[in-house]
Amino acid sequence: MFDIERYYQATDIQDAVAALCADPKAMVIAGGSDVLVEIREGKLAGVSLVSLQGLAELKGIRLEEDGTLLIRPMTTFAELTADPLIRQRIPMLAHAADQVGGPQIRHVGTLGGNLCNGVTSADTASTLFTFNAMLEVTGPAADWGGKGDPGDVLLAKKQIPIAEFYQGPGKVALGTGEILTGLRIASEDYKGYHGHYIKYAMRNAMDIATLGCAVNCRFDAACGHLEDLKLAFGVAGPVPMRCPETEAALKGMAVGQALNQIGARAAAEVKPRDSWRASKAFRLQLVRELSRRALQQALDFARQEGGAAHA
Amino acid sequence: MGVGASIPRVDAFEKVTGRAKYTEDLMPGNALTGMILHSTIANGLVRSLDVSEALKLPGVERIVTCFDVPDIMFPTAGHPWSVEPSHQDVADRKLLNQRVRYYGDDIAAVIAQDEVTASRALKLIKVAYEEYPPLLTMEAALAPGARPIHEECPGNILKQVTYQLGDFEEALREPGLRLIEGQYETPAVQHCHLEKPMSFAYMENGRIVVVSSTQIPHIVRRVIGQALGIPWGKVRVIKPYIGGGFGNKQEVLYEPLNAYLTTLVGGRCVKLDISREETFVSTRTRHGMQFHLKSAVRPDGRMVARQIEVYSNQGGYASHGHAIVSNSVNTFRQLYQAEKATATKSCTVYTNLPSGGAMRGYGVPQIIFALESHMQDIAEAMGLDPIAFREMNAMKAGFVDPLNGITCHSTGLAECIAKGRAYIGWDEKRKSYMNQTGPLRRGVGMAIFSYKTGVYPIALETASCRLVLNQDGTAQLQMGATEIGQGADTIFAQMAAETTGLRQEDIHVISTQDTDVTPFDPGAYASRQTYVSGMALKETAQLFRQRLLDEAARRLGIKAKAMDIKDSQIMEIRSGKFLISLADLAALAFYSLDKTQHITAEATHHCKDNTFSFGACFAEVEVDIPLGKVKIMDIINVHDSGRLINPQTAQAQIHGGMSMGLGYALSEQLLFDGQGKTLNGNFLDYKVPTCLDTPELAVDFVETEDPTGPYGNKSLGEPPAIPGAPAIRNAVLHATGVAFDRIPITPQRMIEKFKDAGLLEGV
């Protein structure tokens, strides 16, 4: 039995925004795989919920005309992993989504929930950082001013880069009444890239990341040099993070040299902390080793395709 | 089919279809919800509890605090009662306790209409404490001036025992001995049975009925009587199917509180369905222990003198107390024998942590980790063959323990080792994995163990059984011993078929124990049931068979001695001729107009023997040095548990134990913060291996015929969990040259030690 004060099933995006405006303390529930756990633990006992379950406009994955991939936030991890577009264009994300929890969780947990939780360990987040994902947030229009019937709320959309969406542990850039309604990856951020995400956890399933490492890169035709590199980590800081200095230093470098340098450079740039789950020193060792292994795997993928990268 | 056949479990269909009724399935829909308020300090006193706000909440029926409960201290260990006060378990807690002894201690309880109301009421209770510094390590608890956690135990030492066989110091004087020392440490871990401990209680005709997920219904009845200060016969305990216990339910947990709560609401049904988090913190754990071992060894490998010093972390309450570490020391003394002297010191220490209790292996997984690590270390240090060294010093057939007389009636240890050695490719891999370089390195390791069967002569061993004939010639089998998921009902049915001559499908095992009707047996623990309860069953079955033959003799005019029962039919022995079916015989016994008789049999076996089972584990690992990961490439347990009653369920039992051993070796441990609060009391943060962390588990047996077992059988329930951790530890040592003397061998500990060993440079 869960201690839920009020549960409201939204009928569409506008209805959800209206319900959240009407009850500013209410929380969004998507798949529920985190929210229900926290209610049960007592952290969210007595909470009011606005559910986005079943809203068709928040589901689905498609390619926009300019080649941008659009993922709606209520897409589950299992759907992401199985989706032909994702598998073909950004297989790295299909793989990252498949690292979450276990099969049951991956069938209820959603991409949107994974991001809006604001936790640094989210398996899809570091990968999406390397794709410069742009988040579409829908909320009450500024000129609506909260007057009148919440049911008549005017909607406004804004686009937020994923790196700006994360504001601190458990804190994301969602104001009152705002919900995540889409996630976009521009074609220039995935075409020609090969990448790999490594989740390091204490178990091979049903676990949270001790460290997550995402490497996404473009090699030259011979796979001899790095043309571009995007490197992101989960649990290497309070929120998922990129390593711009390492990326800049390795751009244009011969792959052998890059493999030699990536670990030490990344370790100098990240900011993991000591916790009872893992020490800072241990996490730094993982940063050193995993960044090199993920880069090696990305290179292997590129070579397997003979340089023919994502279409 | 009788003994030795791999028949399907008698409860398999009910369980896999979800029909089997567990405690939660039986809870009445209108049961009130009981919930417990746990302390948020580890050491101190409850000064006051203000329940006024909580009582105002609609739906709250009653709140009871540590100031209201009967002033009775009671014991909780699932041991048979002792009529000698000096052997009785330590009684050191009340139903709710004003003196807080660990973070999570029980200080009040709410009875409400539903869970949400009860949980909201708990939050409205205001507690004022007098706080003392938490004593979270044995060192802190033993420090001079440390405040007693229990007034009656001033130095926080629950019990300390020292003794010697021979003279250790004198034995060390022998010239040419090599003295090797080792210090080893094992963590507190939890049983993680699938079904939480849960119960519900109500009153009927002035008596209290408690339905509980327990291994020990008759002991629960006694302790409820003791805790509430009421006659034991006023209590009825019913044990339905249970989803595992592993020793945590060889303990009287919340049944006495549950029984008390129903008395507060006029006998209405109250359920206590505690959470998984409460199960981790407020039930029992496996004791964490610290070992200091010393061995004096001749150059040829013969052990001349051995010494053990062990400290066992009891936590806040006595539970099984010193009995656990006593079992560790007994195993130290039994598995290997020094030629001249054995010196022991064991100490059980109260601390402000969750309480240690019984858990599969009862102190033996701890000592076998320490001992088999130590044996490996000695072999490496002295350049001895690790297997030959063990075999030279290990227990042989005919061994009689000098202190308790337990005798080695049969042993297949050498054959177990030989089988494991061949399976893993020991001789070749010990050589080929030497001098490896690079980030991935492989190794093989092994460990052996011995384990007694039941608790004689340390405690009482008694068991009883009843067989009741049905009108159609089939029979009910009633055991006081309990099915707890291990397959007891199945092998009892096989034993009954073997001895009565009834077909196995004609024997219906009543799985539920009900202390009002079930014959007495202390319950499922100590791997005792096939051995001790099996003897009661065999005696009962012989009696039952004899009564059936006597009845046939009366009806047929043939001497009972001349007849036999096979496949539920009476046969003439000499001719092999069919005489009468049991169905027809039963019809006559029940319904004939001249003389009727309900044929039943019942026997109690007071067991005064014991025997050792043995086994070995061989493991091959691959260590990813820069990532601190151990991958089990292959692992086998080979067991001598005497004759197997059901080889397939025996194998399943070993799979489960090996899985526990993997977690113990690599990932499982309870962690606490500086205030004594459990950090990882849930299945996300407490790392039980998943199926993706578990390799194929190979199992083999060496079937000896034990002369004392009812069917040649010996203990099997607990032993599978024992040898895995040291075998894996020794394999990691072989792979990397790094000795881990503390489990679990977690990735972080590996990285730290590999770094110290210089293994992280240049790989």
Image: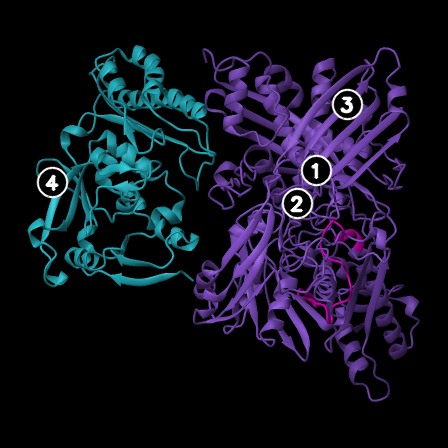
Chain colours: A cyan, B purple
For marks 3 and 1, give the CA distance.
Answer: 18 Å
Q: Which residue is mark 1?
A: B312
Residue A65 x %, y %: 8, 39
Q: Chain of mark 4?
A: A
Secondary structure type for disc 3: strand
Secondary structure type for disc 1: strand
Q: Which residue is mark 4?
A: A64
- Please state which amino acid type lies under the numbered disc 1: Ser
Callout 3 touching callout 1 (CB < 8 Å): no
Q: Is residue B514 magenta?
A: yes
Q: Which residue is mark 2?
A: B356
Closer to the camera in the image, A182 or B400: A182
Which is more N-terminal, label 2 or label 3?
3
- Please state which amino acid type lies under the numbered disc 3: Lys
Callout 1 touching callout 4 (CB < 8 Å): no
Q: Is residue A288 above or below residue B95?
A: above
Q: Is residue B464 magenta?
A: no
